[in-house]
Amino acid sequence: MSYEMIALMMFSSLMLLLFTGQRVFAAIGFVGAASSMMLWGVGGVDIAFASAIKLMKWYPLLTLPMFIFMGYVLSESKIADDLYKMFHVWFGGLRGGLAVGTIGLMVLISAMNGLSVAGMAIGATIALPELLRRGYDKRMVTGVIQAGSSLGILIPPSVVLVLYAMIARQPVGQLWLAGLFPGLMMAGVFILYIVIRCKINPSLGPVLSEQERQVPMAEKLRLLGAGLLPVIIFATMMVPFVKGWTSLVESSAIGALTALAAAILRRRMSRKVFEVSVRQTLGISCMFMWIILAALCFGAVFDGLGAVKAIEGFFIGEMGLSPWGVLILMQISYLILGTFLDDTAMLVIVAPLYVPLVGALGFDLIWYGVLYTITCQIAYMTPPFGYNLFLMRALAPPQITIRDIYASIWPFVGLMILSLVLVMMFPQIALWLPNYVYGN
């Protein structure tokens, strides 16, 4: 049997296991380990063992539990509530102002917790009821929350980019810096769209009543200080890293300790909050470690098969595609996969093929990590089975139907595609900051 056929059988077996509802890491790890033993006998177990050792020796992995813990401390201690009150007071007089504030909330949540699920949960439980109660168009605000929550996997500290860094063997710090400007650019595009749309049709986002806007300046400043707390924590963590005073792991520890200290000083840290934060951190960290371990094993088998060279020859030699044609085809395949898989599953399934191929085609792997992440954001929101669509359905109130949720996302999908095209056309949007920081 040819190596190409073996690779095809591995992918077919993997997809079959995923469709049966098996856990992602279990399906990927089983196919990788079983294939290595069938190909190379008992010695094939060394592949899985070597992958585990490689994972344990990867020092930047220590950032993962630190940032997850920081995010859960800030969210469980209800500091996110203060954030929304700040945006409520300061943006309430603008048409669509609360929707604009919701995007701002999502940006700050992304800087607190690099998971889109956290942003979706906070947006759907805190912002959505307030927006609906004040007469905002339900389809517009549903799209706002779904699009805003997707920023969590692009703006640092992104957990998805940590996974990509491990699989692509790229520096986490450079990837995080590369994701910052594209993430802020995308948030700016969302805000511009909301403002223009509400200016054209004011009924979509009415201003707050005069009574609600009459808040004393002292209270406004107090809320501003409370709302800026996550920004201060983020700056405390990232400035020493960008300046070169601390390593990435040391910065993550500073962020986690600063968040813990802030919750204690604000008297929001109870035994229950601490216990929930630690338990959630342990659970998610272990899940991602298993996924990375399975992906490394699966990728090592593919390296042994030479499948990457075969696919490169097929696209460029037989199909006659240019490197850009191959890259665009990859992004389209991510969009298709995203209709029924989450971002981590997509990454660990196709990264063993795509990442080496991207490098062989001469593209920058840091830049491609940003393209991959933006494409994941789009796939998260694309019907019929986008991950965020069903998460929103589970969290939204009864008056928002699945039809409303599907209809709400198309303008934002278009804006995300526009952002993706801009980053593809102008790579320096992603690469300028990491080149500047690491160049100095």
Image (spheres, rainbow, N blue to C red):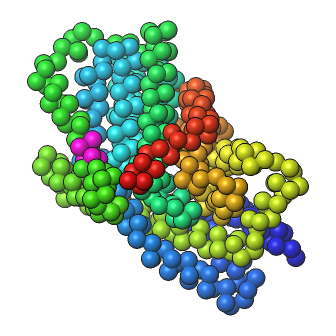
- Is residue 20 something that shows in the picture? no
Rendered residue at 86%/50% (across/down)? 320
Disc count in the image? 0
Q: Main secondary structure of the magenta part?
A: helix
Magenta segment includes 9: no
Q: Quadrant of residue 351?
A: bottom right
Left or right of residue 301: residue 149: left
Residue pictured at 70% horizontal, 84% vertical: 37
Q: How far across and how far down the image is residue 282, in percent?
A: 37, 65
Task: Using the image, determine if residue 421 lies above or below residue 115.
Answer: above
Q: Left or right? Give the position of 148 relative to 168.
A: left
Relative depth, front residue between 325 and 407: 325
Q: Magenta segment: does it hold 232?
A: yes
Where residue 4 sits, quadrant-wise, is bottom right
Image vertical order of residue 136 relative to residue 247, above or below:
above
Which image quadrant: the N terminus? bottom right
The residues colored magenta run 231-235
**Rendering coords of residue 160 (x, y %):** 49, 54
Residue 344, placed above or below residue 46: above
In-front residue for pair 312/18: 312
Q: Position of residue 112 (x, y in %)?
A: 33, 47
Q: Residue at x 10, y 24 (%)?
A: 218
Q: Residue at x 45, y 76 (%)?
A: 56
Furthest toward the front, the residue is 440
Task: Using the image as rendered, state which of residue 18 and residue 215 is in the foreground.
Answer: 215
State the image coordinates of residue 63 (x, y, percent, origin top left).
37, 62
Q: Is residue 34 left or right of residue 283?
A: right
Residue 68 in sight in this render: yes
